[in-house]
Amino acid sequence: MKITADTFWDLFYKVGSIALFVLLWQLGCLAGILPKTFVASPVTIVETLWQYLNDGSLYKHASVSLLRAFYGFILAALVAIPLGFMLGGWFKNFERVFNPLLVFLGQFNPFALFSVFLLLFGIGEFSKVAMIFWVSIWPILLNATLGVKSVDPSLIKLARSMGMGKPGLLAKIVIPSSAAFLFNGLRMAAGTAFFMLIPAEMMGASRGLGWLIINAQINYQIPKLYAGTAVIVVFGILIDKFFRYLEKITVTWKEAQAI
Amino acid sequence: MTELRLTGEGLAPNRPVPRAVAGDKGFHDRVMGWYGIIAFLLLWQIAPYVGLADGRFIPPLSEVVTDALKLVASGQIFIHAATSAQRVLLGLIAAIAVAIPSAMVLAGWFPRLTKFLNPLLQLLGNVNPFALFPLFILLFGVGELAKFAIIFWSSLFPILNTAISGVRNIDPILIKAARSMGASKAVIFRKVVLPAALPSIFTGLRMGATTAFLFLIAAEMLSASAGMGWLIHNSSMNNYIPRIYVGVVGIALLGMLMILLLNKLEAYFLDFKEEVKLG
């Protein structure tokens, strides 16, 4: 690829500020403006990461964390998508009866509930998964409901007038036309699941990325603390990108319509 | 930035009822929204008695209410609620005071600089504040300052980033039209930029407030001697189960109250926006 002025400016606006930030950070550490006792330099962080990557401990913690987030997320999707479809209009009065209750339940703070989950499920895997389930259910539910509501009624009437039954209606009309909303909800939920995983692991775990950084803090291993934080940031961004990509390759009919 | 929705806020509690439904206003129809809540509360009360749930871990509703009344009578609950509300408001107001003026100045006067800085701001907004918890504690200790810093940081970026995108997404025709009619910079700011960006500013505020509340509870559970988060943490340490549920429901109600206040504030300010349009 030829580097033109355009691609240069494009790149400049995309990563320029981040590069500058990292550079200033490194210089600040070298010059001693940022105290070594609190701030690890980017080079040290990369070195630490490289070391963890090589001895396999990064892989171990990350896989444990991702698996936990995955279980909570899948459970939430299994519950929230059908529920959202029902709220969005499958049954006429369902939403009016249950929406206020769901609004109330949605306000339950996940940390406040963590104490309850600990009581009910103990300190093991299940209470962490329950907490992730609880936070990822809301974005999926909200978006599934909105998605069904946004289906063009004339499409449903058209399909019905041609004798399509309820299952066909769901598969051919409702799901395809609300897919963009569904994906948006799933993407938000996956981000949230990973987000809440970290405190869940901080509160009681012996493995995982959350445990890695809280352990680093307790043992005052500053480079490890920063390295763990960096890994968490990168994973958060990757999860977001993955779901955007998934939507792009799955929801292909939107563009076909435009042509 | 990844939008985070950590609570059910936004499930549209005040969605307008369709006309066809609003027409037949029977008693049954008006109270329909309460059926779900009442059924939930009844289930909570009955479940421990019929053996659906373990009464030691999920005490019946009446026990929870009794304990809540005890806390109200002794006035303790007000101390905790006020402490928590004060912490949230302090952090939130500081975040607003920094984020909104800087968003206006950045996006309004220095569009190129904003375009340059945007990826960094998005990245910083994406940093999980929980991951920074240990760092904040190292830097600020475990006192009020650490809690303030956590709430400030976690609510700063949602507010800042939505306000910037609000200003950046203003229809350029509006600004050009105002300029062609000879409006000065100050007038354009007050009459075009600010009203046009207000809806997204309020979206950011609501996101920021929700996040602030979330982190407050987390911070109070780590270290505090008062506040709703502490109430739950302390009760769970002392194995005083009904009080945990008082805390859980109390926080939910406090959060709902805050969202309600923000919605009222938004309605008030968006009225102002319409007045500008008419005048």
Image (tube, rainbow, N blue to C red):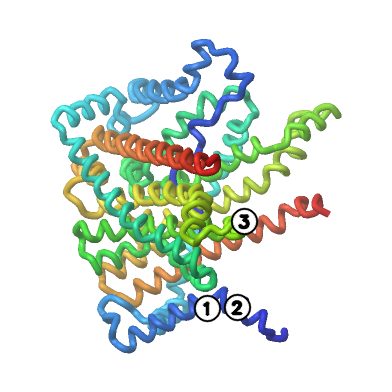
Residue at 45% from the left image edge and 34% from the top image edge: A103
Task: Specify whether disc 3 shares its chain with disc 1.
Answer: no
- Residue drawn at the location 34% of the way across and 71% of the way down: A225
- Identify the mark at residue B177; answer none if there is no mark: 3
Q: Secondary structure at mark 2?
A: helix
Q: Chain of mark 3?
A: B
Which residue type does callout 3 highlight? Answer: Ala
Query: B157 or A76: nearer the eye?
Result: B157
Q: CA distance from mark 3 to mark 1?
A: 34 Å
Asked if residue A249 is positioned above or below residue B26 in the image, the reply reads below
**Secondary-structure class at tag 3:** helix
**From this viewpoint, which residue is outermost toward the top?**
B26
Residue B215 pos. (x, y %): 33, 52
Q: Mark 1 or mark 2, which is nearer the start of the sequence? A: 2
Residue that mark 1 sits on: A16
Q: Is the C-beta separation of discs 2 and 1 under 8 Å?
A: yes
A32 with respect to B24 (left or right): left
Task: Report the amino acid beneath label 2.
Answer: Leu
Q: Left or right of A79: which side holds A27? A: left
Residue at the spot of label 2: A11
The answer to whether B91 is drawn above or below residue B84 in the figure is below
Image location (x, y in percent) of residue A180: 66, 48
Q: Is residue B112 above or below residue A79?
A: below
Q: Amino acid at mark 1?
A: Gly
The spot of residue A37 in percent (x, y) is 25, 78
**Mark 1 packing: few (<14 Cα in 10 Å), some, or many (20+)?**
some
Dot 3 and dot 1 residues touching (CB under 8 Å): no
